[in-house]
Amino acid sequence: MTQTAPEPQHTELKHTMNMLFAQARAAARALALAGSDQKQAALDAAAAALERRRADVLSANARDLAFAEKKGLSPAMLDRLRLDEDRIGSIVQGLRAVAAQPDPVGEVMEAWERPSGLSIRRVRTPIGVVGVIYESRPNVTADAGALCLKSGNAAILRGGSESLHSSQAIHAALVEGLRTAGLPERAIQLIPTRDRAAVGEMLAAQGLIDVIVPRGGRSLVGRVQSEARVPVFSHLDGINHVYVHAAADPVKAEAVVVNSKTRRTGICGAAECLLMDRESFAAQGAALVAALQALGTQIRGDRHFQTLPGVQAAGPDDFGCEFLDNIIAARVVSGPGEAIAHIAQYGSGHTECIVTEDAAVAGRFAREVDAAIIMHNASTQFADGGEFGMGAEIGIATGKLHARGPVGARELTSFKYLVHGEGTVRP
C-alpha cells in the first residue's frame, strides 16, 4: 500500500517543534547551573523591559481583542484577554516578586544520618523542560516564564490563538531579561503559531519535555490528559462552591459570596455555586440574591431560590457547571453533611469555601471536603499563587501527585539524594 506523504505544512511545523525541543533541552542544562543572582537579575531586567514596552504590549493586546471579538468570545473571556495599565503593572510586580523569592534549587529538603555512617540529603533540583499550554490570559506568559526560570527549568509556552500578539510582546521582554543576565535566550520559548497541531507535537514529546502544565477550559485539559505521553500537572475545572452555614456572620457571608462570584467571573477561582443552609437562606437568602443581582449576576436556583424575584430555575446541568461568566447556581441544603455530599458529587477539587463562625463545623468541612484549597470566611478568588505569596503561579493543580494547589517555583522542582560516606562499604 502506498503511504501518503505528509503535507509540507505539517513537515515544517514538526521541524520547527523539534528544533524548539532541542534548544530547550540545551538551555535547561545551562539553567540548572545558573546561580541565584543571575536568575534574579534576568527577572528584574525582564520586569524593567516590560515597563518600557507598555505601549507595545497594549498595542498588541488591542489587535488580539479585535481578533477575539470577531471570533465571538464572551465578555468574560474578553476580560481574561484584556490588558490595561493596571494589569501590566501587576505583571511587572509579579515578575519582581518571583525574582525576590528564595531560589528553590539546591534547597535541602531533609537531611539525616544512617547507622552505616552515611550522611543523606534530599535536595531540590530543576525538572528540566516544562511545557505550558494555556488559553486567553496573556499574563500567563510572564508568570509561567518567570516561575520556570526561577526554578531552573527551560519553558516552552503555547498560548491561546486569541492572545498571540500580547504573548509575543510579553515574551520579548522576558528574552531581553535573559539576554541582559547572560542566560540562554532559548530558556523561555514561545511557539510562534496558532496552528493547533503544535499542541499535539508537545503532547507527544516524550523524552523531550519533562512535564506539561495545561491551563484552560475543560476541552483543553481533557485533550491534554487523554493524549499526553508526557507527565501532566492537571488543572481541571474551577467548579467552586461557597457554603453559607447556619452560623455564618451575615456581613461576612455577603462580602465573601459577592466577591467570590463577581470580582472576576472568568477566572478559575470564581465561585460557580452557592449553597445555603435552610436557616441561613431564611435569614439572608433574599439579601444575598439581591446583592448579586445588583451586580448583574444571573442566579439559577432550586425550588427554594425560585421563590425569590428574578431567580431562574436551575437546569440539570447547572450544578457542576463552570460558567466562567456572571452566572451562579444556587441550592438550599439541610446542613453540613448535605453540603459536603453536594461538593463531593459536583466539585472539581479546585477551591471550596465555607462561611461560618462555628469552628467545629469549619474543621469538619476542612477534613471532609476533598479539594486542593479550602477557604474559611474568605473569597474563593484568593485561590491564586500571588495571593499565596508565591509571586505568581503556573496554574492550580487539582491532582494529588507531586503538586497540588497553586504551582509556584518550588512546585516546579524535583529532588535528588546526595549521599556522603568515608569509604563506606555495605557488608
Image (cartoon, rainbow, N blue to C red):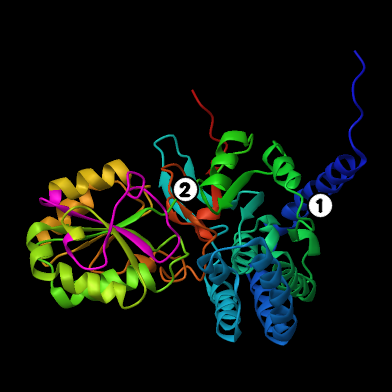
* Span shown in magenta: 307-336
Labelled pair 1, 2 in contact (Cβ < 8 Å): no
* Quarter the N terminus occupies: top right
Mark 2: amino acid: Leu
Q: Magenta segment, principal secondary structure?
A: loop
Q: How many labels does the image show?
A: 2
Left/right of residue 140 with respect to residue 183 in the rendered view: left
Judged by depth in the image, the label closer to the viewer, 1 or 2, is 2
In percent of width and height, residue 270 lies at 39, 63
Q: In which quarter of the image is residue 38?
A: bottom right
Left/right of residue 123 with respect to residue 3 in the rendered view: left
The residue at 60%/86% (across/down) is 85
Left/right of residue 86 with respect to residue 31 in the rendered view: left
Q: Is mark 2 on a helix, strand or loop?
A: loop
Q: Mark 1 points at which residue?
A: 23
**Rounded to the nearest whole Å, what is the CA distance between mark 1 and mark 2?**
30 Å
Q: Is residue 335 magenta?
A: yes
Frontmost residue, 16 versus 416: 16
Asked if residue 217 shows in the view, the reply is: yes
In percent of width and height, residue 419 lies at 53, 42
Q: How crowded is mark 2: few (under 14 residues within 10 Å), some or many (20 or more)?
A: many
Mark 1: amino acid: Gln
Asked if residue 416 shows in the view, the reply is: no
Q: Residue 236 carries which label?
A: 2
Left/right of residue 261 with respect to residue 171 in the rendered view: left
Q: Which mark is residue 393?
A: none
Q: Is mark 1 on a helix, strand or loop?
A: helix
In percent of width and height, residue 74 lies at 54, 64
The residue at 62%/35% (across/down) is 227
